[in-house]
Image: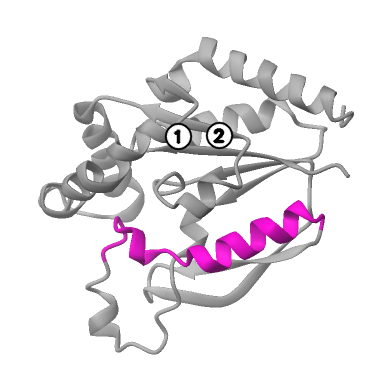
Amino acid sequence: MRKPVVIGVTGGSGSGKTSVTKAIYDSFKGHSILMLEQDYYYKDQSELPFEERLKTNYDHPLAFDNDLLIDHIERLLRYEPIEKPVYDYALHTRSDKIIPVEPKDVIILEGIMVLEDERLRNLMDIKLYVDTDADLRIIRRMQRDIKERGRTLDSVIDQYVNVVRPMHNQFIEPSKRYADVIIPEGGHNHVAIDLMVTKIQTILEQKSFL
């Protein structure tokens, strides 16, 4: 019985993991492939007062509803459709909206904590870690948060020093040891991305998906 191929892509905030994920995805356009972002699976906090929601540490493993994420991946592995949740960052809780997702032959799971949970790792065929220097990661995060999210420079730096950096060192960086492949410099590493695309093509051909 055939089973979809699951590729996990992780790395620190601003590492370029989303660029790597998109590059792989775009290489298989026209084929049966989907992206599943861990960011969509932050826990529902509707039972908490808004003031309490504001205290959420989104860079901690406990912020994610991995039970639901694992259930959805297992459904997709059985070629069953799922309803992906949508997170409302303004209200700091799960939205009442959902995104219908049809099963595909390739599933790319992307997020900062996808290698931290052993249960998630056990569902993956290939595990990638995008490894980028901390100075580049903080610059990219500054650019994103200031331009796209209206944050001040001071607030971005304060969050990075007090939350993002400690959580990266405690949870994300150690998960590198579980990776099958480490990709330096993210989406700029075209050689590594091309090698991964070739490897995925080989797996798909072996499973007679292509």
Q: Position of residue 171 (x, y in %)?
A: 28, 47
Indicate left or right for 171 with 25 as reference.
left
Q: Which residues are magenta?
A: 57-79
Q: Position of residue 90 (x, y in %)?
A: 38, 71
As rendered, which of 157 and 133 lies closer to the eye?
133
Question: In the rendered image, which residue does mark 1 sit on?
Answer: 17
Secondary structure of the residue carrying numbered label 2: helix
* Residue 96 falls in image quadrant: bottom right
Q: Position of residue 5 (x, y in %)?
A: 71, 38
Indicate left or right for 73 with 180 as reference.
right
Depicted 35 relative to depicted 48: above or below: above
Question: In the rendered image, which residue does mark 2 sit on?
Answer: 21
Quadrant in which the N terminus appears: top right
Indicate left or right for 151 with 62 as reference.
left
Q: Amino acid at mark 2?
A: Thr
Q: Is there a contact, CB below 8 Å, between mark 1 and mark 2?
A: yes
Quadrant in which the C terminus appears: top right
Please identify the dominant SS of the magenta region. Answer: helix
Q: State how far apart marks 1 and 2 are (Cα).
A: 6 Å
State yes or no: residue 74 in magenta.
Answer: yes
Secondary structure of the residue carrying numbered label 1: helix
